Image (cartoon, rainbow, N blue to C red):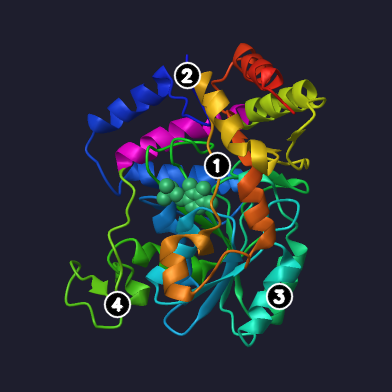
Amino acid sequence: MTLSYGRQWINEDDIAEVVKVLRGDWLTMGPTVDAFEESLAEYAGVKHAVTFSSGTAALHGAMYAAGLGSGDFAATTALTFVATSNSVIYTGATPIFADIDDTFCMNPAEAERTIESHGGHVKAIIPVSFAGYPFEIEPFRKLADKYSAVLIEDASHAFGGDRGNHKIGFDADMTTLSFHPVKHITTAEGGAVLTNNDNYARRLRMFRNHGTTRNESEFVDEAPGPWHSEMQELGYNYRLSEVHCALGLSQMKRLDEFVARRREIAEMYFSQLAGVEGLTLPPEKSGHAWHLFIARVKDELHGEFFAYLRDNDIRLQVHYRPVPLQPYYRKKYGYKAGDFPQAEKYYRQAVSLPIYPLMTDDDVLRVCGVIKNFAWR
Ligand SMILES: *Cc1c(COP(=O)(O)O)cnc(C)c1O
């Protein structure tokens, strides 16, 4: 059987919950959306959870709520999925990038350097808990305070992880999640923003629903009758349906189990692969959510190693090519090879091994066996 780097785990309960919604009265913006949002907020210990049609839409919402617009800068990491910085561009603002440190997350000193080189004008700082690694929040909180920026954590890789003695979800001013099938829980497509800030939550809810509100206390005009609603800002249709939320709500029951299993698999990799010369294992930290298990091999073996595992029915991935070096970013902003040496070095060496809760111990041992048999030299 082919193993890939990640996949969902749908059980009969999940299917039954989705079918129940399909037989009911509400297909969108009904009680299941509310229940899923409550479940997310309660899990993370945060006041508001606002769902979106994708993790990317959730990021766009967070950038909007933070007030980003044309002429603004937002600082993020060179090593992330393109959605993180694309969402900045959607608002008309300009993303600026910082190199990574040896946790693979944004290097706070590099972030400060980038911000300073743009005159200290930064409206949002967006670190990513990369692969599920809960980066140190304090240095970024200090930067956000220093530059009066909104701190947004892209926690698409880290839902269910812990920072200190609490769940990831409220350390930043807003925390975004993705429910894509490879993430910790899935709604097929979907995402959410977590926040303790009432004003951000209000803006996020408007933004995902065409910029409209039915909340009387927010009306600008006098209401001629109970049908009255107002479009006050330009928003989008970024709603997540009842069907998707039914799946998400059902998956939430197993989130802790999913994360625990990911941690077990990571432990197995560490113990099985510790002695393999030529293979570098990823940075560890308690609270790690292990969305990805990223090993590194020497530059000159990278292609060969990748192909060899493919030949053995193990479909690796490389997460990710540094975003500013993508053709669109090079052309638009003039970035070039050598601008982000740490992220580029990482990219020449990284491979994401299979890790997902449905993997059996035998699957993990098979991957380790294949890796040990590679012609290391
Ligand atoms: C998955 C992911 C997203 C959001 O992706 P969607 O597919 O839109 O849900 C954003 N940022 C990172 C780092 C991701 O891995």
Tell whether circle 2 marks a residue whose Cβ is less than 8 angstroms from ligand 1.
no
Label 2: which residue? 2
| In contact (CB < 8 Å): disc 2 and disc 3 | no
Which quadrant: the C terminus? top right
* Number of residues whose C-alpha sits closer than 10 Å to that of mark 2, classed few (under 14), some (14–19) or many (20 or more): few
Compared with residue 48, is residue 281 higher up or lower down, i.e. above or below?
A: above
Name the amino acid type tagged 4: Gln
Please state which amino acid type lies under the numbered disc 3: Glu
Mark 2 or mark 1: name the one nearer the start of the chain. Answer: 2
To which residue does mark 1 refer?
318
Circle nearer the viewer, 3 or 4: 3
Q: Compute the Cα span from label 2 to label 3.
A: 43 Å
- Percent from the top left, x then y, of residue 252? 51, 34
**309 inside magenta stretch:** no
Q: Residues within 10 Å of mark 4 (few under 14, many from 20)?
A: some
Q: Is residue 139 left or right of residue 176?
A: right
Q: Nearer the viewer, residue 108 or 61?
A: 108
Residue 189: mark: none
Mark 4 or mark 2, which is nearer the start of the sequence? 2
Residue 250 falls within the magenta-colored stretch: yes
Q: Main structural element of the magenta stretch: helix, strand or loop?
A: helix
> SS at mark 1?
loop
Q: Which residue is mark 4?
A: 232
Residue 179, by quadrant, is top left
Mark 3 or mark 4, which has the lower sequence index?
3
Tag 2 and tag 1, C-beta contact below 8 Å? no
Task: Give the spatial CA distance, label 4 vs label 1.
Answer: 42 Å
Residue in the foreground of this view, choosing between 285 and 335: 335
Check whether the beta carbons of the residues at disc 2 and disc 4 lie within 8 A of each other. Answer: no
First in sequence: mark 2 or mark 3?
2
Residue under circle 3?
Answer: 112
